[in-house]
Amino acid sequence: RVCNLSYLQTDWYIDQMMRPAYDSPSVPITWPRLDFCSGTNEYVSVEPEAKQQILDFYKQDPETAKKQLGEDPFELKNILKYWVRSKNPDLHIIPTDTLYLSIDKKAVRESGMMMAADSIPDKMIISLKNAQQKQGGLYRNEVMIYEMLAHADWKRPMYMSVTLGPGNYAGLDNYCVLEGLAYRITPFNYGQMGMIDSNLMYKNMMTRFKYGNVAHRGIYMDETTGRMCKTHRRMFLMLADNLLRQGDNDKARKVLEKCEAVLPGYSVPYDDEDSQLARLLAEAGCNKLASNVATQVIDYDLQYLQYLASLGTDRLNTYGRTTYFLVQSLLEAGTALQKADAAKAKLYNTRISQCMRGNEAAQLGMQIYQQQISGQAAGN
């Protein structure tokens, strides 16, 4: 069931999600309507300073505490039931910045998700620290994500789209595994977002997804469709990069060739973001394709830098971030071209060198690039 997280802030949309639609059952939201109607539970503050009081309560009078707040006061279901949905305004908070979700291990084993380890954790630990620091608490749409997670019990998989911006994954980033165009929420903490189920993603990208007529020459690509195609291409690159890191060059080569076949440059033009594609093609041994992509990326970067330089120093200084990414792209594409076609690289290296010497935008980008490298080295 597709669920729009922005709309999930509204009561009318939650009503829709709680009803079956065609072959899709309702989402696992169990709240009565009075608990999410307009003006109710639209925002809940996170107040971890109350945590010690609760611990003291359980220590002093455990029976009463369990009766009033549940067996585990910081279990996700209990927080939602006894605090978020409380009719007592003094209790209408989240009294911790760390939630716990007990794991049904049998359901996880039968779910078909990628197992991160032989053992399945007893609990999933969800940090609310970012939400507390950013906005002081949770909005209703985020609370509803936790409500669904608490009652899905791993029998029905939950996914989040790859197009969500950073910070919009409700603190579940570290638990997400990429399977194609969506991240699957798992009970395994991978430490950082970006873990890939390469076998399932390969199957999805190579055999299940349909790419329409993007490869048809002359087809009109509006801005929105073109932007979505760039997202598809980025997923191809993430998969190919993962396969190369695993040493599976044959599969990586097939992925990159499929990417070029269904999302060709004449329909989805290459820009500075595609220097990684050139690099991966060169690493996989697809030299002809790598050379073609790298030269187009370099042409794009040089043309863009030339335009920025024409703006004058004052305006150019407002484009520092752009010049940085263009120079970074230029260097990566140049390295890929050197590996794929040394003769052509010699010609392009001359053009790149001339740009670096005589183009003010390129010099600004290189200056920022070197600062970034120095900063990373100092951090390490």
Image: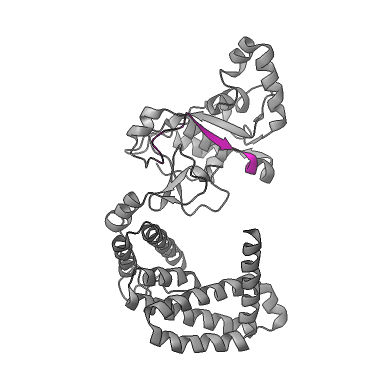
x 53%, y 83%: residue: 303
Quarter location, residue 16: top left
Q: Which colour scheme is used?
A: one colour
Q: Judge whether 21 appears above or below 92 on screen.
A: below
Q: In this view, does 107 lie to the left or right of 351?
A: left
Given residues 22 and 113, the one toward you in this image is 113
Q: Where is residue 359 in the image (x, y as percent from the top left)?
A: 62, 86
For image coordinates 40% across by 53% down, the residue present is 181
**Would you place residue 20 above or below residue 300 in this image?**
above
Foreground of the two, 213 or 37:
213
The residue shown at (67%, 21%) is 55
Q: Nearer the viewer, residue 239 or 311?
A: 239
Q: Name the spot of residue 344 as percent of width and height, x first.
A: 40, 86
Residue 258 shown in magenta: no
**Residue 120 magenta-highlighted:** yes
The answer to whether residue 81 is left or right of residue 218 is: right
Q: Can residue 53 be seen in this view?
A: yes
- Give the side of residue 132 with respect to residue 281, left or right: right
Nearer-the-camera pick, 268 or 288: 288
Q: Quadrant of the N terminus?
A: top left
Compared with 67, 166 (above or below) is below
Which quadrant: the C terminus? bottom right
Q: Please state if 232 lies on the left or on the right of 166 as rendered.
A: left
- Residue 360 drawn at (x, y percent): 65, 84
Q: Which residue is drawn at 48% across and 54% down?
A: 163
Asked if one can make out residue 155 in the rendered structure from this viewpoint, the answer is: no
- Range of magenta residues: 116-131
